[in-house]
């Protein structure tokens, strides 16, 4: 029997022992799109489904040894980045990705700028905003929520100005997530690099409750979609629909934040190319 092939997404992220966010969320969301995650753990965290209590960084040499071993054998179409624990790790990972880009200029790099837990607990051993800067410079898409955008662009007050400030020092698109607003509809806005004054918007019904790992789910679903051959617009649309579905079917493991149900995505094949269909069959 001939085995099927799945495209690979290289993931740098922290381990969440509650299983709601971090590397487990990444693996599940990427697999649900029909791609395969290559997980490199950057930090071990102490957290439950509500709060983070401690972060322990993985040694940078271990991170790089794992990543180099993987890319030496396995074709990687997309890199997805979550927490990296501190600037030292971020700088080394960014340099590694720069080297990948020299060999593969079309490499897609998705950065989920996790500056803290959903309840504001720190997930970095130094200044999270400073630590993430090297990763922003290698990104092709950054996915901040509203509080993260404000921290990354503190000199601006207007939303468009904040996005413009963020884009000044990077060559990446921005998908701004509106889950922290208060409107009945969640507005996610895609700002393309060099065209940040115009944008594409999606709206989704705001669901009751709080969710642990929704940002990881969305960013990784985008990465999985891109790996399977979708262009950026298609990837953003399909990944948001998938994430909304995951939140609609979220489940509880204890009191507090719910866990997104990251089942396999269901997309009408008539809207997908043959290459994309091979990723989900």
Image (tube, grey):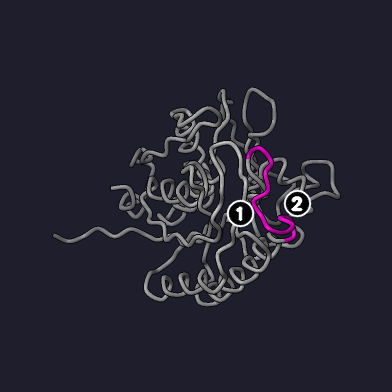
Q: How far is disc 1 from disc 2 in space, using C-alphas?
A: 21 Å
Pick the front one: 23 or 78: 23
Which is more toward the observer, 173 or 3? Answer: 3
Disc 2 crowd rating (10 Å Cα; few below 14, some 14-19, many 20+) is many
Image depth: mark 1 or mark 2 in front: 1
Residue 3 on image: x %, y %: 21, 60
x, y percent for residue 41: 50, 60
Q: In this view, does 224 lie above or below 63?
A: above
Q: Give the range drawn in magenta.
A: 118-130
194 versus 218 height, above or below: below
Q: Residue at x 38, y 49 (%)?
A: 31
Residue drawn at x 53%, y 46% is: 216
Q: Is residue 250 visible?
A: no
Name the spot of residue 221 as percent of width and height, x first. 47, 47
Looking at the rendered structure, the secondary structure element under dot 1 is strand
Relative placement, left or right, of 124 versus 154 is: left
Per the image, is 129 magenta?
yes
For numbered disc 2, what is the local secondary structure?
helix
* Residue 140 relative to residue 242: left or right: right
Q: In this view, does 128 lie above or below 190?
A: below
Mark seen at residue 55: 1
Residue at the spot x=75%, y=51% of the render?
Answer: 152
Q: Position of residue 104 (x, y in %)?
A: 50, 72
Secondary structure that dominates the magenta span? loop
Q: Residue 134 carries which label?
A: none
Instruction: Out of 106 and 7, give the one closest to the viewer.
Output: 7
Q: Is residue 245 visible?
A: yes
Residue at coordinates 55% horizontally, 64% vertically from top-left? 58
Kindly indicate whether the residue at mark 2 contacts the one at mark 1 (C-beta within 8 angstroms): no
Instruction: Identify the image quadrant of residue 130.
Output: bottom right
The residue carrying mark 2 is 152
- The quadrant of the rendering that contains the N terminus is bottom left
């Amino acid at each position: 029997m001939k085995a099927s092939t799945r495209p690979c997404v290289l993931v740098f992220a922290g381990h969440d022992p509650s299983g709601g966010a971090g590397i487990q969320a990444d693996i599940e969301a990427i697999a649900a799109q029909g791609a395969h995650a290559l997980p490199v753990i950057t930090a071990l965290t102490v957290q439950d489904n509500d709060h983070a209590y401690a972060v322990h960084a993985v040694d940078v040499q271990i991170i790089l040894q794992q990543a180099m071993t993987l890319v030496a054998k396995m074709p990687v179409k997309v890199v997805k980045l979550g927490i990296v624990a501190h600037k030292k790790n971020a700088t080394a990972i960014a340099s590694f990705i720069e080297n990948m880009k020299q060999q593969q200029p079309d490499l897609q790099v998705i950065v989920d700028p996790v500056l803290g837990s959903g309840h504001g607990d720190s997930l970095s051993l130094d200044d999270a905003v400073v630590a993430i800067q090297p990763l922003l410079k290698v990104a092709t898409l950054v996915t901040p929520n509203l509080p993260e955008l404000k921290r990354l662009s503190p000199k601006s007050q207007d939303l468009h100005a904040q996005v413009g400030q963020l884009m000044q020092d990077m060559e990446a698109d921005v998908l701004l997530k509106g889950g922290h607003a208060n409107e009945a509809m969640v507005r996610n806005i895609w700002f393309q690099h060099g065209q940040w004054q115009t944008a594409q918007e999606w709206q989704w019904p705001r669901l009751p409750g709080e969710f642990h790992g929704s940002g990881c789910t969305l960013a990784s679903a985008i990465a999985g979609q891109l790996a399977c051959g979708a262009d950026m617009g298609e990837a953003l649309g399909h990944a948001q629909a998938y994430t909304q579905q995951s939140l609609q079917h979220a489940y509880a493991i204890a009191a507090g934040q719910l866990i997104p149900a990251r089942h396999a995505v269901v997309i009408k094949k008539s809207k997908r190319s043959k290459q994309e269909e091979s990723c989900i069959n």
